[in-house]
Image: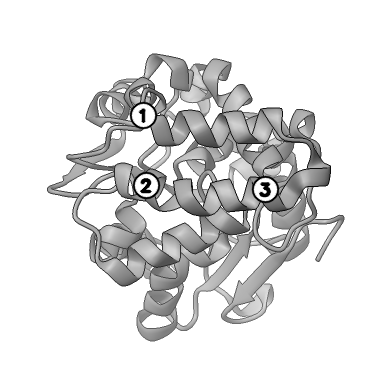
Amino acid sequence: MSDGIAWYISGPEPSDAPVTVIFVHGYGLAAESFYDQVDFLRASYPRVRAVLLDLRGHGSSDRVPAEDCTVDDAADDVAAILTAQAPTGPLIIVGHSLGGMVVENLIRRLPVEDYERIAGVLLISTSMRPFAETGVAALLQTHAAEALYDAAQRLPNKVNRARQRIARIIAPIFAAGVTGYPRMERLEFHVDMLLDTPLDSFVGFFDDLVDHSELAAADRLAGLPGIVLVGSMDIVTPRSQSELICSHWPEAELRVVDGSGHMVILEEPEAVSQALAELIEPVLAQR
């Protein structure tokens, strides 16, 4: 834990790692959502260091008020962990959903000396435009999302038990709505992470994402090697949003994962690991 942010390490010390992969998770999730990718690195690239964190208001990180749940603040947290846990050497940065916008924000604002260490970027199921302009509108029209948001806003903290009862009913419906063809155990894993996320975090980050744009990150994305992954059935950040990212980032390769929804990292982890390997290999070839 560092300044209220929980972080996790897999792999060698920074001085022994030829490259460090930074993982930034999505909305209502936690670092553990990348467990397939961490297992893949341990098995296939044991020399690679992985750094993960629970974004503020998520997982084991400290709870924060809704007004402090912003993309800017989350990117500052990632930058602090990066400085402390990956101070030297090449970086590959991975972001899913909310984490993708946090990564774009991070890249846009990183000091030059850290920006120049970026050897690859993997953006998964994300956007550069405000979420109000994306497919998330379809999700917000569902009764599940509406009820989750209302419960967080209307019920005071002193009746948190009631809030949690409502969340336990809604979260499985919400999770199923954003996936394509989930395996049941992975759907349950997703639901557990949603239930562990304070409702204030849902409200705070949602309010920020509705208006937040990272189109200004285009200048710094240009020139970086990268891959943009999206599920063909993603209704939260549909393919059009990934195409927009690639239109501003010519070096990036767009990959559409057939049959997957918004939770590509859990629905089709092999596709994510394959993309990660393709970013790692050129770095290792030079080390």
Front-most of residues 128 and 179: 179
**For marks 2 and 1 on the same chain, the one whose residue lies earlier in the sequence:** 1
x%, y% of residue 191?
Answer: 45, 58
Q: Is residue 136 left or right of residue 163?
A: left
Are discs 2 and 1 less than 8 Å apart at CB?
A: yes
Q: Is residue 134 above or below residue 280?
A: above
Residue denoted by label 1? 142
Element marked by disc 1: loop
Mark 1, mark 3: which one is toward the viewer? 3
Residue plotted at (60% across, 63% down): 52
Element marked by disc 2: helix
**For marks 1 and 3 on the same chain, the one whose residue lies earlier in the sequence:** 1
**For marks 2 and 3 on the same chain, the one whose residue lies earlier in the sequence:** 3
Residue denoted by label 3? 162
Q: Quadrant of residue 116?
A: top right
- Label 3 neighbourhood size at 10 Å, few (<14), some (14-19), many (20+)? some
Residue denoted by label 2? 173
Check the image and name the residue furthest to the right: 3
Q: Amino acid at mark 1?
A: Thr
x%, y% of residue 140?
Answer: 41, 25
